[in-house]
Structures are given as C-alpha cells and as structure tokens.
Image: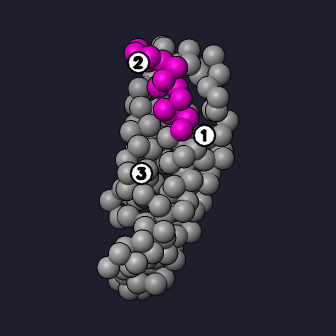
Amino acid sequence: MLFGPDRSGTAAGDLGLLLFRVFLGLALAFGHGLNKLPPSERFIGGVIEMGFPAPAFFAWASAVAELGGGLLLALGLMTRPAALLVTINMTVAAFIRQAGDPFGERELALLYLAGVAMLLLAGAGRYSLDALIRRRNA
C-alpha cells in the first residue's frame, strides 16, 4: 500500500478501467482501424510480405479487428472476445510485421498489445455493457 489501498474491484478502480478501456478502444478504432478500411494495395502488400495466405482477407480481418474491436472495447461489449482478436492482431504487428524494427518503431504495437491483454484478463469492469447485460440476465 505504498500509494494507498488497492482500488481493483471498487467503484474507483472500475472508473479507471472505464477511462482506460474507452481511450484505448477509440484510439485503436479511429487512430488505426478506420485508416485501414478499405485495405490499400500497400497494406495488402505488407500482408503478402508476411507470408499470409489470402492476403486481402487477412488485411480486411486486421482492419476490422482494429476498428470493430476498438469500438467494442470502448463500449465494453464482448470485451474479452474483442480483446482476444486485437491481442492476436497486435502480436502479429509487433512480432512478425515489425520483427526487425527497433523498439521505438514497435513500441505502439506493444503498448496496444499490453493494454488489450490486460482487458482480456481483467474484463470490462462494472461500467460496461457487458456488466449491464450480466445484471439483466441474473
């Protein structure tokens, strides 16, 4: 308790989770995913370079994971499945697409990866559509 009590599972902790989830999701959706739709020939070419089969399909899948997954994360709807898709996408970005790049160029993908992995493990928190749906179904 160096800086005060642990706030996980409290209203304050869930408010912090809400702010983090909304910022991360909207930044991912509008800062990255929206710019990739429809996938450009250059983006599809990058998928080809990584050796993926059906590169146009995987380019679309990546863009939809970022835009759709980011929006779902911001809403706190289907948070863990959305976080899983984005985790896979950011793992590919950080460790395959940017494998030979210096840390500074991989840093953003790694930050997104860490953030979505945290949401995958923690869930959306009480201030989310996931929690609202759970309360209504209980």
Q: 4 above or below 25? A: below
**Disc nearer the start of the sequence (3/2):** 2
Locate residue 61, reporting x and y percent: 48, 32
Decide if residue 91 is in sight here. yes
Q: CA distance from mark 3 to mark 1?
A: 14 Å
Q: Position of residue 40 (x, y in %)?
A: 65, 22
Q: Which residue is mark 3?
A: 83
Q: Which amino acid type corresponds to the residue marked 2 in the rendered image?
A: Phe
List the residue tagged with mark 2. Answer: 52
Q: Nearer the viewer, residue 90 or 81?
A: 81
Frontmost residue, 58 versus 109: 58
Side of 84 where 33 appears, left or right? right
Q: Give the magenta-colored segment's residue range.
A: 50-64
Dot 3 falls on a residue whose secondary structure is helix
Residue positioned 54% across, 50% down in the render? 70
Tell me the residue that label 1 is attached to.
Answer: 33
Q: Earlier in the sequence, mark 2 or mark 1?
A: 1
Q: CA distance from mark 2 to mark 1?
A: 19 Å
Quadrant where the N terminus is found in the figure: bottom left
Image position of 52 with respect to 63: above or below: above
| Residue 38 in which image quadrant | top right
